[in-house]
Image (tube, grey):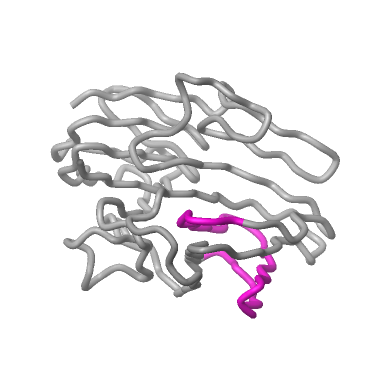
Amino acid sequence: MSVEIHRADDRFRTQSDWLDSRHSFSFGPYYDPANIGFGLLMVHNDEVVAPGTGFDTHPHQDVEIVTWVLRGALLHQDSEGHDGIIYPGLIQRMSAGTGIQHSERNDTEEPVHYVQMWVRPGEYDLTPSYQQAEVSPTAEFMPIASGLPKHKATTAVTINQPRAGLSVARLAPGDTLRLPQSPQAHLFVAAGNVILADADLGPADAARIQEADGQRLTAGPEGTELLLWEMTD
């Protein structure tokens, strides 16, 4: 296994009076030809949106968009008629397909903090679609947005990409678990901290892992919440 650590404070960052967004990969005006993604993962943004603000209607095409809220609530509306609130414990997937327009806004009086991830689709030019489901994270990796065949019977929502899958785990202080076997894995610390390969990863730190094969993770003194993308060749 090889592990490449990426710290929260080293990321590209977009800041304004309403948005604080950290980008794991090149995004918008921030471009690094050596950091345009990892495997099938194109975008991995850690975002905080101020009350009464957000992203107005904008288009997407041929991308799988997965959203996981950590704190607060995010209002989603799109051109296919979907209208709903995303909150902690609800996983949302939007397949842009041939084209969709949507907005994401914080209509509450508190900031909303969420992680949004984009994955290349397995098939192009499909009819746009949307799916969401409530989940209750456990101390094991639970598939929540996956197209991997091994997750077919257990994933909360399905993405249009049979070579990638997102799982979540929530560990109490000192809990341990093992990484699943995967040619490529992207581990993101959504909360707390975790020890991986003698490295202490804190909030919003990430690890890009090649050839994950059962290596042990140990939660720190505050416990941790982890988001893990597995990707096959």
Give residue 178's quadrant in the image.
Answer: top left
Judge by depth and name the residue closer to the eye, 139 or 58: 58
Is residue 91 one of those drawn in magenta? Answer: no
Quadrant location of the C terminus?
A: top left
x 67%, y 64%: residue? 102
x 57%, y 34%: residue? 23
Above or below, comparing residue 175 to residue 155 in the picture: above
Above or below, comparing residue 65 to residue 222 in the picture: below
Q: Residue furthest bottom?
A: 81
x 35%, y 47%: residue? 228
Q: Is residue 154 left or right of residue 213?
A: right
Judge by depth and name the residue closer to the eye, 204 or 25: 25
x 22%, y 64%: residue? 151
User: What percent of the width, then of the height, locates residue 90?
Assistant: 50, 69
Q: Please provide the residue range marked out in magenta.
A: 60-88
Give residue 174's quadrant in the image.
Answer: top left
